[in-house]
Image: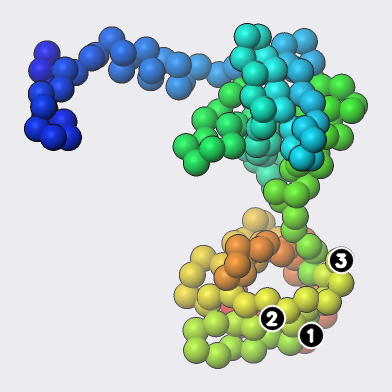
Amino acid sequence: MRGGRGFGGEEKEFDLEAMEKETEEMLKIRYLNSKNAVFARTGGGFVSLKTGDESYERVHVVRMFPFTDPEHYISIRTPDENSKEIGIIKDINDVGPEVRRMLEEQMNLRYFTPIITKIINIKDEYGYAYFDVVTDRGACRFTINIGGSSVVHLSDTRILISDIDENRFEIPDVLKLSIAERKKLDLFL
């Protein structure tokens, strides 16, 4: 079977077998646990992985369901721009306590999400909302784009807010805010 022209005008051969093999490899799920994966801390504070004959000097640790099921289905990926999944940890308890701490440290850095405990003020100006809040990490000011998808409802009362710098803030239960705070927030929901 012939393909089209490649860069420079040369004729390229279409390799169906290679494409099928690559597709099969991409669809294969490898589950990682303490029996088939060795995680280690790198000198730079990252995590490395050895599984079977493969070694990865650095991996990314990504929750597949960060808000609804943070303890299960942890994706271990290559850190490059075209990140590929190496494997999945079904349950964080499938690895030893030291490895669990190491992976949780990485995920806590990735999913750093201060909890908004008090809304001092929200100002609307030129399509942006300027928040002045108190979080479980201290006082904070941030800006969101009103027209974008900056506010996500995780449930009827739980809200995730992403600012223009892609930092995330959470309000676990808007009903726990005062009536005055909810009125300020209602304008942007």
Helix, strand or loop under label 1: strand
Residue topped by disc 3: 136
Q: Quadrant of residue 163?
A: bottom right
N-terminal-most mark, 1 or 3: 1
The mark found on residue 131 in the picture is: 2
Return the x and y of residue 106 as percentages of the image width and height. Answer: 76, 41
Task: Pick whichever, 122 or 24, lies toward us.
Answer: 24
Q: Which amino acid type is marked by label 1?
A: Ile
Task: Pick whichever, 171 or 101, lies toward us.
Answer: 101
Disc 2 to disc 1: CB gap under 8 Å: no
Q: Rounded to the nearest whole Å, what is the CA distance between mark 2 and mark 1?
A: 8 Å
Q: Residue at x 60, y 31 (%)?
A: 77
Please give left or right for residue 25 compared with residue 135 in the image: left
Residue topped by disc 1: 120
Q: Quadrant of residue 74?
A: top right
Whether residue 70 is situated above or below residue 4 in the rendered picture: below
Whether residue 47 is situated above or below residue 1 in the rendered picture: below
Q: Rounded to the nearest whole Å, what is the CA distance between mark 2 and mark 3?
A: 15 Å
Q: Which amino acid type is marked by label 2?
A: Phe
